[in-house]
Image (cartoon, rainbow, N blue to C red):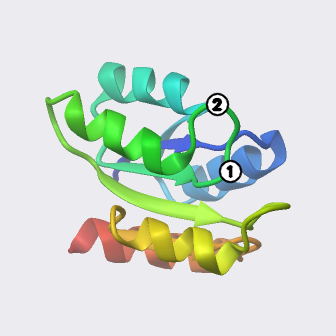
Amino acid sequence: MAKIVIIDDVAGVRRSVVSTLKRAGHEVWEADSGRAGAQLVRQHAPDLVITDILMPDMDGLETIELIRTEGGRRPRFLAISGGGSLVASEEALKAAAVRADGVLAKPFLGSELTAQVSKILEA
């Protein structure tokens, strides 16, 4: 299957996504920040990067841009967001839709995640 990096600052979300994707047969690495995720992308050349949009220090949009500007193999991107105290989920995902290959609002079912991952990887 695919090689996937998941970037989310919430450990519970990462665990859930990693578990779902591993059950679907994917090879998965996880990071708690955009910079750590970019490092994993450099190390593993994944097919897909799933990144939260609203994170401290470096948000998901900045993370996508960093990974794209570093050259090498260019993965596809799935942006996820549940919104935050200052930004609604819909607004974060609308902004992400311009840069990512797909978006998914939190909370989501495992079946929704795997369907979106399959759609992006098959495109």
* Whether residue 4 is visible: no
For the point 27% across and 32% down, which residue is it?
Answer: 45
Mark 2 highlights which residue? 57
For the residue pair 73 and 114, the one nearer the viewer reads as: 73
Number of other residues with Cα within 10 Å of mark 2, as a class: few under 14, some 14 to 19, many 20 or more? few
Q: Which x, y percent locates residue 32?
A: 67, 31
Identify the amino acid type marked 2: Asp
Where is residue 63? Give x, y as percent.
44, 39
Image quadrant of residue 102?
A: bottom left
**What's the distance in space between the residues labelled 1 and 2, CA to CA?**
26 Å
Residue highlighted by disc 1? 19
Which amino acid type corresponds to the residue marked 1 in the rendered image? Ser
Position of 113 with respect to 32 (left or right) is: left
SS for dot 2: loop
User: Are there few (<14), some (14-19), or many (20+) residues within 10 Å of tag 1?
Assistant: some
Q: As drawn, is 14 to the left or to the right of 97?
A: right
